[in-house]
Image (cartoon, helix red, strand yellow):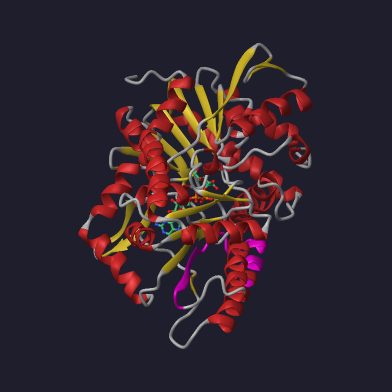
Amino acid sequence: MTVRSSFVVVANRLPVDEVTTSQGREWRRSPGGLVTALHPVLVEHRGTWVGWAGGTGDAPEPFELDGIRLHPVPLSAEELERYYEGSSNATIWPLYHDAVETPVFKRRWREAYRMVNQRFADAAAEVAAEGATVWVQDYQLQLVPAMLREQRPDLRIGFFLHIPFPPIELFMQMPVRAEILRGLLGADLVGFQQRLAAQNFVRLARHLLGLRYEGQVIDVDGRPVRAGAFPISIDVKEMEAMVATPEVQARAKQIREELGNPKTIILGVDRLDYTKGIELRLKAFRELLADRKLTVPEAVMVQVATPSRERVEHYQALRVKVEREVGRINGEFAKVGVPAVHYLHQSYSRSELAALYLAADVMMVTPLRDGMNLVAKEYVAARADTGGALVLSEFAGAATELRQSFLCNPHDPDGVKDALIRAVHVEPVEARRRMRIMQRHLRSHDVRQWAKSFLSTLGVPENE
Ligand code: GDG
């Protein structure tokens, strides 16, 4: 018999990975901000997380891990290709990120998106207790709120979009635009990373469906739907604790040595994604080397580009471009045994990333468009020693909060170069002042506070 919960999270992915140990296969909690933020709430409410467990074909039976119930939703190989790689990551992802790559629209992908969204909604309807709160996450599941409300009008439904929400002109390209919008309007509260995104949404509701709104509350046939900005954050305490361990401190020193003790280590950490501006950052570095404003081995760059969505064409093309640029820079500026760019197309542990943050003098976060960008926040939180400098794109959601970073317009190569040089040469006193202000902000705006703020706006009492 299905156990029903008063609090349900619905996300494309379950927060677990299946790993092989000496005892056989077992599930482990995967690291990530969302799990950290929601874990306490889920434990307190004996909550259930509905999501895809990875793999195709039959899904595992529901199970429990670390006090959370996990309810796997199956995906076939064809659905994975059409719903996830197609609709989600080749249509919606580029369109919502200012169409920095051309969105691909295909009818059969849309049909799969609909079907899979219905399956997630059905699963949520099955596990939610009478009057429960259901919190749906992100762009892969935009139809779920309305599908869920249709079956279960008793539920309180929240939706949070982790990526940007585009202006009307762009959204209107979507062939199933009204269906997506109605899907989202099934929620009681629709949360975005930025105020501007929430505004885009309420304006769109009027433009496309002729709905009235007052402030950020839309009137959907007499039912109020609230939109709002809830900038996501990280587990600041966890990052501070990690960088304080002797292991991470020692590893950071070792990384510096392995890089040949350069004066300046410039770091980038991203999923290998065309929204992240990896190429333009490499180009800025190359031009500064050519101008002799930076030289090897005094300055070296480390670029971690975690493999991502490797079967989607845009991503394959990006990999070729990035690797060509890395080859070009190293060809022109490396010395024997001293690459100018250390390019790492690999995944690392959280502690290795923390050590890299600690070792880096300048962190470059230069997305063309990004909902928030947690790497920027992680770097700031990691620098409890108040060393280091952050170069940050104005087009990352994080730029609204991290005002003391070296802000730049990623579309302006000279601006990026200028920000990088200023960050490289910043006086230590000034660098510390900037870091301290940003750290103070993050300590009072961490991921727990984010979850609390969303849920209290949704009307979930704290000790429910
Ligand atoms: C979406 C939105 C929004 C990266 N490489 C490794 C690794 N990471 C971790 C980072 C960071 C996370 O992945 C990436 O988060 P971002 O925020 O930078 O980017 P997206 O994946 O695009 O996330 C974004 C976010 O949702 C949350 O709402 O901020 O705007 O696009 O935590 O540290 N982690 C490990 N190994 C790696 O190699 N363990």
In the depicted structure, whether residue 344 falls above or below residue 367:
below
Residue located 55% across and 36% down the image: 193
Name the image quarter holding the N terminus.
top left
Going by the image, does 428 lie left or right of 12? left
Q: Is residue 426 visible?
A: yes
Residue located 67% across and 53% down the image: 90
User: Which residue of the protein is positioned furthest toward the left in this rendering?
Assistant: 246
User: Which residue of the protein is positioned furthest toward the bottom in this rendering?
Assistant: 336
Name the image quarter holding the C terminus.
top left
Q: Please state which of residues 20 and 209 is positioned toward the viewer in this rendering.
A: 209
In the depicted structure, whether residue 44 falls above or below residue 117:
above
Q: Please state which of residues 119 and 440 is positioned toward the viewer in this rendering.
A: 440
- Place of residue 161 in the rendered image (x, y in percent of width and height, measured from the top left): 56, 37
Tell whether position 311 is magenta.
Answer: yes
In the depicted structure, whether residue 405 falls above or below residue 192:
below
Q: Please state which of residues 272 and 23 is positioned toward the viewer in this rendering.
A: 272
- Magenta residues (range): 297-320
Going by the image, does 312 lie left or right of 380? right
Tell whether position 386 is magenta.
Answer: no
- Place of residue 96 in the rendered image (x, y in percent of width and height, measured from the top left): 67, 44
Q: Is residue 62 visible?
A: no
Residue located 32% across and 74% down the image: 257
Q: Please state which of residues 92 and 409 is positioned toward the viewer in this rendering.
A: 409
Going by the image, does 322 lie left or right of 11? right
Residue located 73% across and 29% down the image: 204
- Place of residue 454 in the rendered image (x, y in percent of width and height, measured from the top left): 46, 27
Quarter of the image holding residue 65?
A: top left
